[in-house]
Image: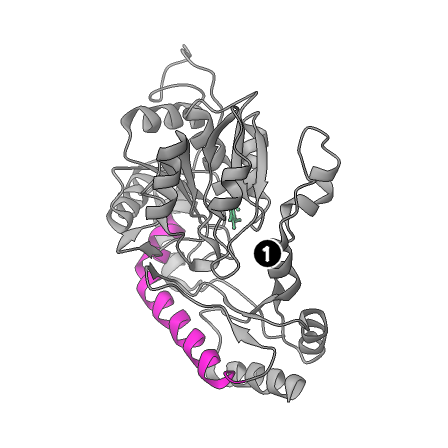
Amino acid sequence: MILQIEPWIDESELEQLKKVVDSTFVTEASLTDEFESKIKELTGSKYAIAMTNGTVALFCALKSLGIGVGDEVLVPDMTFVATSNAVVLAGATPVFCDVEPETLSIDLEDAQKRITNKTKAIVPVHLYGQAVNMDDLMSFAKLHGLLVVEDAAQGVGVKFNGKHTGTFGDAGVLSFYGNKTITCGEGGVLLTSNEVVAKACYRLKNHGRDGKGTFIHEHIGFNFGFTEMQAAIGISQLGKLNQIIAKKRQIHDVYGQELSGIDNFCIAETKSYTTPVFWFTSFFTSKVEELQKFLIENGIQTRRFFYPLHLQPCYKKADYINTDYACPFSLRAYNTGISLPSAYNLTEGDQQKVIDAVKRFFL
Ligand SMILES: Cc1ncc(COP(=O)(O)O)c(C=O)c1O
């Protein structure tokens, strides 16, 4: 089977992990500090706080900004469900907004219609390795007095006008889940330039404390700690990031050249303001179901786009969440979007097999 995605893991991760075994420090210690410093270097963020995963980092971002019960948060309808579940975890209500047809970024015209006097924040999602237009987004947020939490879970290495995603809003979040551009197995990093937010997030992840070693807790907090094993893998992966980004661009460009000009099969466009990372190379076709079935029968794994949030059974069942709004462009993206094998490990030969199979299907 040619996998749609898999991490590039080898001896270099083992080498870093050996340091953890030798040191016997397994919970957060010097490697976690080093990982956070490297993330600050990569993103230009003033603060970077490593956490268990991106979902809890989103929760901490919202919570530290004072978002909770009674508040509404605008989220794009086309995203992974963790974006809105983090809003629910914080006690607030997600409000689903349609996405722009080309970029799949939250549609600000649609979002404007969904603003009420309870709306406190907006969570733009940098989807599939493309940046949201953060100039427009930040102007919108300013105009309506909204806090901004950027979901840059898929945005490692992705820039808007030269600045790393996750560094524009009040806080931003990166994910290092196994299928992401680089991975720690699980892992998330909260980015912010605001010291108050950084301190509040640190407390939320550390049982309400500003540091370790005390059992008197001034604040209520939890345990969303990172581990030295995650940091070890993350440091090694960061060393490979440029190579991974370059290979993914090459994979994207080869698909783009070889599969251009096929009727009813168009590659996802990139805007000039975005420095993308082609985490996945995606296409649009009205024959998405048939194509996916054909490819799997030919030993090729693909991935459909995310199921629109307003159609998710879990939200349909939650009567305090409004799922009655139509989000036609999000639905269209789901009905037509497909991501082809895009892993760093994809060989030229395997990519050619994918290309040939797609051509056999369409031509
Ligand atoms: C858009 C988006 N938001 C949030 C998350 C959650 O991140 P994590 O899996 O690290 O909890 C993910 C990925 O998993 C994601 O793709």
Q: Is residue 24 visible?
A: no
Query: Residue 4: horizontal and vertical position, in percent?
Result: 57, 68
Viewport quadrant of the N terminus: bottom right
Q: In which quadrant is the C terminus drawn?
A: bottom right
Give above or below for 220 relative to 141.
above
Q: Quadrant of the rendered structure where residue 161 is?
A: bottom left
Q: Residue at x 49, y 39 (%)?
A: 112
- Looking at the image, which residue is at 52% across and 33% down? 115
What secondary structure characterizes most of the magenta part?
helix
**In which quarter of the view is residue 272 placed?**
bottom left
Q: Is residue 354 above or below residue 138?
A: below
The answer to whether 263 is drawn above or below residue 175 in the figure is: below
Q: In the rendered structure, which amino acid carries the disc numbered 1?
A: Phe
Q: Which residues are magenta?
A: 232-261
Query: Who is closer to the viewer here, 130 or 138?
Result: 138
Residue 247 lies in the magenta-colored region:
yes
Q: 206 or 103, which lies in front?
A: 103
Which residue, given by chain and number where applicable, does mark 1 sit on? Answer: 329
291 in magenta: no
Against 231, is 57 above or below? above
- Residue 127 location (% of width, % of height): 48, 54
Residue drawn at 46 percent across, 79 percent down: 256
